[in-house]
Image (cartoon, rainbow, N blue to C red):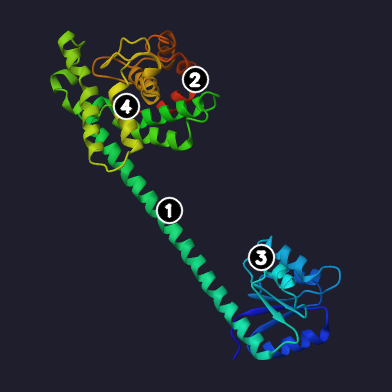
Amino acid sequence: MKNSSTILVVDDTPINLTLISGILKNKYRIKVATNGEKALSILNNTKQKPDLILLDIMMPDMDGYELCSKIKRSELSSIPVIFLTSLTKPEEEEKGLSVGAVDYIHKPISPPILLARVATHLKLKEATDFLKIQNTILEKMVKERTLELSESQQATIVAMGALAECRDPETGNHLRRTQHYIRQLAEELSKLPDYNEYLTEEWVDVLFKSAPLHDIGKVGVPDSVLLKSGKLNANEFETMKEHTVFGKNAIYEAQKQMHTTNSFLLMSEQIAESHHEWWDGTGYPNGLSGTDIPLSARLMAIADVYDAMVSTRIYKPPFSHEDAVQIIKENSGTQFDPELVETFLKISDKFYDIKKKFSDSY
């Protein structure tokens, strides 16, 4: 009974083709080619590729070495090649193996040896193909699991951020908008020579995921301050400023539970603590200035302030997009990093589009 394997026999001598086909035909499907070009034509133009190739070396125009090399440099490289030849010198056999052959059978052909070698290499190929399929399945499962974990992580992050935001019903889609603002700003900034190596796709992705935790410390601010409809007095403002420290400490405690450094938690901590620092050093909580303020926090400062200005708050009506852009421009070099402001001005229309896409409903 024939199995399902197909063998391509390549030899320029008809009697050899007849002999080899006769030995194998009762067990396998056989295809034959009398030269290298015909063999390549069969390999490239048939949907059902052979499972193994038996290849003569001494052929005109294109010898077996050249044909084997071409096969191994192509998408057909996984097909095992066995040389059938009367060449018996060790260096010739070494050359055959070096161009990619898996075995070397000397002529005159011994039917039992041919059958045994063919069966062995077909089993090896079957095992290899099975492992490739299993690896593909495993890779797919890993990707799906990684995606699932990433989505779960993101959902948890947003839920944690919402703990702070839900105490202030007017903020609505603030978390989602600031995520997209900050991504747009970082991606545009990454085009500049001083940033393109640092602001990798991975870094921007961590930034995007960290953004919702920027105000998580608000859970520690009393409602009398957080929800006050009028301007905060000096004492109330000092209380409000503590949300940056509350947020930083909460995330730091989470980091202490990790056995390795976690880039997401590190960036979340930076943003929570420092997004109210000012470029000129007059911000809070630590009075940092210039590039001593983490880049993630400098980016968040623009995203957070823009959204606060164009959104309705219990203490104010929304500003127009144009007014918000102008105020950020006027505060370049004082509240905001001048280079980031220049980047923001280039893409401010994208901020407006995000504001419209994730608008609040009241």
Q: Which mark is residue 343?
A: 2
Q: Which mark is residue 143?
A: 1
Residue 280: x, y in percent? Answer: 36, 9
Are the residues tagged 4 and 1 within 8 Å (C-beta)? no
Residues under labels 4 and 1: Cα distance? 29 Å
The structure residue drawn at horizontal position 53% and vertical position 70%, both measured from the top left corner, is 128
Q: Which residue is mark 3?
A: 76
Element at label 4:
helix
Residue type highlighted by circle 4: Gln
Residues under labels 2 and 3: Cα distance? 49 Å
- Position of 72 with respect to 214 (left or right) is right
Residues under labels 1 and 3: Cα distance? 27 Å
Element at label 3:
loop
Is residue 265 depicted above or below 60 in this figure? above
Element at label 2:
helix
Q: Give the mark, 2 or 3, whose residue is nearer the N terminus.
A: 3
Q: Which residue is mark 4?
A: 270
Q: Give the mark, 1 or 3, whose residue is nearer the N terminus.
A: 3
Are the residues tagged 1 and 2 within 8 Å (C-beta)? no
| Residue 262 sits in quarter | top left
Residue type highlighted by circle 3: Leu
Where's the C terminus, which quadrant? top left
Q: Give the mark, 4 or 2, whose residue is nearer the N terminus.
A: 4
Residue 276: x, y in percent? Answer: 31, 18
Q: Give the mark, 4 or 3, whose residue is nearer the N terminus.
A: 3
Q: Give the mark, 4 or 1, whose residue is nearer the N terminus.
A: 1
Neighbour tally class for label 2: few under 14, some 14-19, many 20 plus, Cα within 10 Å: some
Where's the N terminus, which quadrant? bottom right
Taking the image as drawn, is residue 11 in sight?
yes
Q: Give the mark, 1 or 2, whose residue is nearer the N terminus.
A: 1
Residue type highlighted by circle 2: Thr
Element at label 1:
helix
